[in-house]
Image: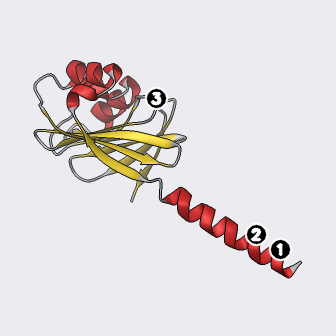
Amino acid sequence: MKAYKLFLGMALAAGSLSFSGCDKESIVSASDLPSQIQDYVTAHFPNNNILQVTKDREGFKHNYELILDESITLEFNKKHEIVDIDGISKLPDSVVPEKLLLYISTNFTENYIIGWEKEDKNQEIKLDNDMDLVFNMNGDFLKIDD
């Protein structure tokens, strides 16, 4: 029985090592991007050039990270949906959900949005004053994140 447990433990450890060995990051051409991602960039960032595209695979998950000029990064999930946008200047209003945009324009009139992220159950906005605001998926304000 001890030998069986030892063998099973070694097999599980080897399996987890080989699974984590499947992580792969590769640079791909912008022309090889899925059409949904190309369309998103064209619609919301028409004046920005794509400088680099990275396809990242972690096990069964994969995503695309794009670096645009003017220090903008975009991340798309495996369904080719935008999940993260970071910049150093004001993001286009078209990339921010309307309810979040209204909240910011009403409550933070002196600030603008430089980042947006969609997580499992929440959305997060980063303002130019380095303040992070958390909203639920319906766009209701939850808290200021430290």
Q: Amino acid at mark 1?
A: Tyr
Q: Residue at x 72, y 72 (%)?
A: 9
Please provide percent x and percent y for residue 130.
Answer: 26, 53
Q: Are marks 1 and 3 in contact (CB under 8 Å)?
A: no
For label 1, the residue is 4
Question: Could you tell me how far apart the alpha carbons at marks 2 and 3 are, in whole angstroms?
Answer: 35 Å
- Residue 87 can be seen in this image: yes
**Outermost residue to the right:** 1
**Outermost residue to the bottom:** 2
Q: Are marks 2 and 3 in contact (CB under 8 Å)?
A: no
Q: Amino acid at mark 3?
A: Lys
For label 2, the residue is 8
Instruction: State the SS at label 1.
Output: helix
In the foreground, 103 or 29: 29
For label 3, the residue is 79
Among the two numbered marks 1 and 3 on one chain, the one whose residue lies closer to the N terminus? 1
Q: Residue at x 49, y 34 (%)?
A: 140
Mark whose residue sits in front, 1 or 3 = 1
Among the two numbered marks 2 and 3 on one chain, the one whose residue lies closer to the N terminus? 2
Mark 1 surroundings within 10 Å by alpha-carbon count, few (fewer than 14), some (14 through 19), many (20 or more): few
Q: Are marks 1 and 2 in contact (CB under 8 Å)?
A: yes
